[in-house]
Amino acid sequence: MSLHDTKILQIAAGAALLAGAAALGAWFALRKRPTAAQIELERRQFLTQSGRIVDGTLLDVAEIPGENGEILTMLQYDYRIGGVDYECSQDITLMGDVVSVAHVRSGFPCSVRYQPGNPQNSIVVAEKWSGLRVNLPRWCFENQEKLQSESLGPQTGD
């Protein structure tokens, strides 16, 4: 192989590499990027499929103004993993068909799905899963009545 043929091969390889880099750059620049709603949907689907479940407590449902002036409905909850307390919130604004704000009761227990390697990444509701409990079990009310009667002390028949 002569020096001239080697030079032609080097030029062709450089042109092919340059064309490939240009095509890759054009693809990155022109590709359709996912919206924030699509990213959040994928996060909820990921946690529904692979997240672990832990007990938590619903703290509140708050409506806060968003960046573009819309009102966001945020579900606030807390949970404990490995002795560490986490207090998180989840945007449920677009999940009106999945969860009703009227069914959310502050102080009620709930189930929380979290990512094992990243426990602050968590959800309470998703499209195909809900950690909300509509009501407390009967035994909770019985124990509450018992605790209230004990805290009042002995009853006298005055």
Image (cartoon, rainbow, N blue to C red):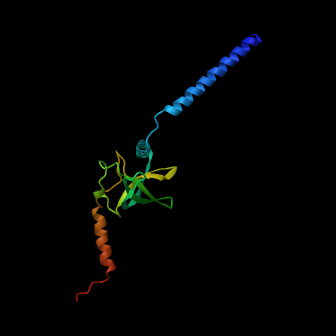
21 or 80: nearer the eye? 21
The x, y position of residue 60, in whole percent, is: 37, 62
In the rendering, at what x and y percent does residue 141 appear? 28, 67
- In terms of depth relative to the viewer, which is nearer, 118 or 2? 2
In this picture, residue 150 sits left or right of residue 157: right
Position above or below: 38 against 1: below
Q: Residue furthest bottom?
A: 158
As drawn, which residue projects farthest toward the left? 158
Q: How many marks?
A: 0
Camera-nearest residue between 41 and 67: 67
At 26% from the left and 87% from the top, the residue drawn is 156
Q: Quadrant of the C terminus?
A: bottom left
- Which residue is most to the front? 69
Q: Quadrant of residue 40?
A: top left
Counting from the top left corner in percent of width and height, residue 25 is at 56, 30
**Above or below: residue 33 compared with residue 93:** above
Residue occupying the point 31% across, 75% down: 148
